[in-house]
Image (cartoon, rainbow, N blue to C red):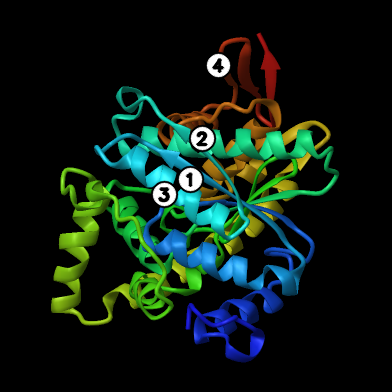
Amino acid sequence: MSHKKLTQKNWSSWHHQLHKELLTKKILIPKGSNILISVSGGQDSMTLLTLINDLKKLHNWSISVWHGDHQWHEKSSLYALELKDYCEDKNISFTFDQANKESISSEEKAREWRYKKLCERAKTLLNTNHQKHNIYLLTGHTSSDNAETFILNLSRGSNFAGLSNIESKRLLENQIFLIRPILIFSREDTKQFCNDMKIPVWEDPTNSDLKLKRNLVRKKIIPTLEVIYPGCSERINNFSQKMSNYNNERNDLSELAYLYCKDVKGINRNLLNSMCIEARCTILNRFLKEISAKQCSSKNLTKLATSIYEKNKGQINLQEFLKIVWNKNYINFEKS
């Protein structure tokens, strides 16, 4: 199929699925968008690149590719050059950045580096073209990544937000959106797609390194769970979606509760104290966000809510130059 001229008439089932998803969610990647795709060379990102490139004329997209070379294995520089040749052969603009591997020694630091460089590249595109339109950064996250993230976050004691689905769209910076279009596919789907469409794949050998937590979950834990409870990955994703819905509902209700307790004088202490401790913490945290971008820990929020409940008058220094004060009737922030 890869040797034929691909048209809408001979699309694969994956092309049709993604096209249908984009028609259903038109705000995901609008027509005429400027797209920057993060491509590692693995099966997920190569599936993403192929599908988006095949659909670009129909949606009038302008696409370019960015690759991040972590230098975690000896062939990483060669992979980058081969990817460059692959993209240029298809008339796709290609850029890459090379990391200092000592500075990205962990999964978290590598992820931070990738998103930092992606945003820098997006800003370059915006500035170069004097664009008034948004830039859409696309990554190849799948439903399999979602299940892995759920298990990792659950294991380290994450909150409700951490147990929610990976977001398909979110704003990173002004005019820069992060989009994950192929969450509708699993890693098995992308493997089959690359095989059927004869798409080359540059497999990173570090993906087999079980010292990396995500690899351990991917290679050992999920396969074991699938043996015990076949189909558990899909059920994990379904539960994660329910958690997303619950979290959205909880946020909306929290906002209503916050508006209910707040007036021009501050937070009504009597109304706040009529609620459970969890609700009081949520409302106080929401109040704090209006004053400071710095997050207050769950432990400190609980301590604060308890003090306000038990004492008719008091004050607590939250941060440098910022304290919360309260009396019998109202709660407010003051700069110290």
Q: Quadrant of the C terminus?
A: top right
- When the figure is inspected, residue 240 is found, relative to residue 213, above or below; the finding is below
Q: Residue at x 29, y 58 (%)?
A: 151
Q: Residue at x 66, y 25 (%)?
A: 327
Residue 298 in percent (x, y) is at 44, 36
Q: Which mark is residue 83?
A: none
Q: Earlier in the sequence, mark 3 or mark 1?
A: 3
Residue marked by disc 4: 319
Front residue of 34/153: it is 34
Q: Nearer the viewer, mark 3 or mark 1?
A: 3
Please, what secondary structure does the residue beneath circle 2 have? helix
Residue marked by disc 2: 305
Examine the rendering and report whether any part of residue 83 can be seen.
Answer: yes
Residue marked by disc 3: 82
Residue 320 in percent (x, y) is at 57, 11
Q: Residue at x 57, y 26 (%)?
A: 294
- When the figure is inspected, residue 142 is found, relative to residue 103, above or below; the finding is below
Please, what secondary structure does the residue beneath circle 1 have? helix
Please, what secondary structure does the residue beneath circle 3 have? helix
The three-letter amino acid code for the residue at tag 2 is Ala
The three-letter amino acid code for the residue at tag 3 is Glu
Residue marked by disc 1: 277
Q: Earlier in the sequence, mark 3 or mark 4?
A: 3
Q: Is residue 238 left or right of residue 334?
A: left
Question: How much space separates mark 3 and mark 4, taking CA atoms?
Answer: 51 Å
